[in-house]
Image (spheres, helix red, strand yellow):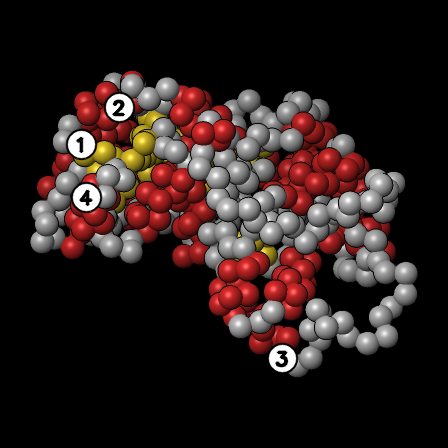
Amino acid sequence: MTTSSPLLAAPTAAERLAQIRLARTKGIGTATFSKLMGLYSSATQAIEALPTRARLAGRPAPLIPSQTAIEDEIAWLAQRGGAHLLRSDSAYPHLLTLLPNAPILLFAQGNTALLSSQSVAIVGARNASNPALKLTEQFATGLAESGITIISGLARGIDGAAHRGALPFRRTIAALPGGLDVTYPPEHAALQADIAQQGCLITEYPPGTAANARHFPRRNHLIAGLSRGCLLVEAAHRSGTLITARLALNYKRLLFAIPGFPQDPRSRGGNDLLRHNKALLVERYQDILTHLNNTPLSAHNPAAWERPPARQASLFAPPPPAPLPPAAAVSTSLVSTPPTSPPQSPSPTMPNDKNNDSDKKNILSLLAHTPSTVDEIASRCQLSISAVAAILIELEINGAIQRHEDGTLTTLS
């Protein structure tokens, strides 16, 4: 999915600052950002309109970061060789722009040119065997020496070995589950500092954000989305590594796996992918180079993707009647027009009783950073679709969840 037209033109410095402020506003996700930009044509106008529209809708004003706060953040990043990356920026990763719901804003430190270079992700077990660690370094070294950038998640085990193998060639990217100034795991502080100087760090999270278990799926999206192919080394069943593998397949990336010893649990995930012809067997890094050379970049075009079944339309989609003036036509909860008169009794689709809080907690517990549909959520929490939809609206207004352009939802916590 390409970005919408308002994001394609390079913005002025003032407008770019406003876009960063808007993207950093709690409750403004990818879909809402795009809708606001489409309605108001600029982030500057959208920011000016948000407080009034929220008040008219009977909602608290959104927490928009001040211009001074963002200017300070820009200066902080610049001092460390970092920067914000908006989808409209030339340094924004090209392959990432092809993904549905590509992040509006990224934080990068180091050589951002690597983000659009030909790259391969290497992921695997944190408790990897010594032979696997040595083989990972050999693969990363061979690929980097051949001009391929190595992407991984800076985790213990295979990730660290992949970064170390590519670092001497200044061709490695680390996707982080927290802010650029946060190191996880702590023992990789020196490695992270070296990558910031000789490679590139990338994250969706602003400075000061601690690494959190719920952040890892979004980090995995970056790893899979930035790469042309993904290599698995020792991936156990139901591991985070297999999440990245699934994402790579969904994004039509090449998926490689090194076969492992059958009785080692750390090899079962990769071996299963090979057994079911979902991954390409590789024994040397040259095997990966051959597949990359034989696979055109057009294979990553979203037009070639297998589309999922039709999703339920967004609850905030504009109604079918004739277009309304901008002040009344906004299709998001933050800027929606309030009802002409207050309801006389609680709506059956907007639960207001004492069970509402427990239902909210139940629904939040089901959501993760991996997208879910309204139907999927309703089927798991034993509530009607209308009741779930109403609670989701409340949660989105409160900034607890994010709704994407395809109608799916993820948590923001």
Q: Identify the residue at horizontal 23%, vertical 26% (top origin).
A: 288
Please name which of the two marks, 4 or 3, marks the residue nearer to the observer. Answer: 4
Q: Is residue 176 visible in this depiction of the protein? A: no
Please name which of the two marks, 4 or 1, marks the residue nearer to the observer. Answer: 4
Circle 2 is placed at which residue position? 291
- Disc number at residue 323? none
Q: Identify the residue at horizontal 18%, vertical 51% (top origin).
A: 268
Circle 1 is placed at which residue position? 282
Of the two numbered discs 4 and 2 on the same chain, state the one appearing first in sequence: 4
Q: Is residue 199 left or right of residue 49?
A: left
Q: Is residue 309 visible in this depiction of the protein? A: yes
The picture places residue 89, in percent across and down from the top left corner, at 58, 26
Circle 4 is placed at which residue position? 275
Crowd rating for badge 4 (residues with CA inside 10 Å; few <14, some 14–19, many 20+)? few
Of the two numbered discs 1 and 2 on the same chain, state the one appearing first in sequence: 1
Kindly state the secondary structure of the residue where label 1 is placed.
loop
Alpha carbons under labels 3 and 2: distance apart: 55 Å
Contact between labelled residues 2 and 1, with CB atoms less than 8 Å apart: yes
